[in-house]
Image: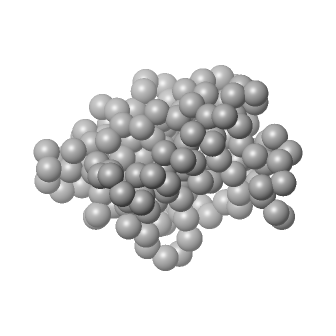
Amino acid sequence: MRIDIAAVGRLKTGPEAALVADYLQRFARTGRSLGLPAVSMTEIDDRRAVGTAAEAELLSRAIPAGAVLVAMDERGDQPGSPDFAARLAGWRDQARDVCFVIGGADGLDPGLRARADWQISLGRMVWPHLLVRVMLAEQLYRAATILAGSPYHRA
């Protein structure tokens, strides 16, 4: 199993980058004993793509063949953290690769959204695409702690 995040834009040194790195490092440590691999991040240079269609083309190149495609999109399902953890465990148990895609400031191209196996929303509010990375990284870590039976998630 592989877990990838493909995102438009590059995180510069700053609080968002530090948070993403911290949560993904925590996920790697916690997930190792659960059979969950470290997450790899592919950043798409948003200066090379003008518009969501061009971004979708670049994101598509970063999606591993055969991977479950999860689109981070405001119109998607709003699963609870335990549901997200169960889905991640299911993909692990099926030895499925997973790729989460995060669009740029204008979101994801409708064609790429339509290809997704699952669309996830982080709530009814719209979030800046850089913060979506932080929130996704935290939810991945939270999922690992739920699967490990850790008290981090207080339900």
Residue 129 location, x and y as percent?
37, 61
Q: Residue at x 78, y 58 (%)?
A: 153
User: How many marks can you see?
Assistant: 0
| In front of the other: 150 or 111 | 150
Residue 40 location, x and y as percent?
46, 33
Residue 54 location, x and y as percent?
19, 47
* Image quadrant in which you'd find residue 52: bottom left
Left or right of residue 107, residue 83 in this image: right
Q: Residue at x 36, y 37 (%)?
A: 42
Left or right of residue 52, residue 70 in this image: right
Q: How is the image coloured?
A: one colour
- Res. 43 in view: yes
Q: Residue at x 49, y 76 (%)?
A: 125
Q: Quadrant of the N terminus?
A: top right
Residue 151 in the image: above or below residue 6: below
* Image quadrant in which you'd find residue 148: top right
| In front of the other: 60 or 33 | 33
| In front of the other: 54 or 40 | 40
Left or right of residue 41, residue 22 in this image: right
Residue 133 in the image: above or below residue 34: below
Residue 48 location, x and y as percent?
13, 45
Q: Residue at x 24, y 48 (%)?
A: 55
Residue 115 in the image: above or below residue 153: above
Q: Quadrant of the C terminus?
A: bottom right
Farthest bottom residue?
125
- Res. 112 in view: no
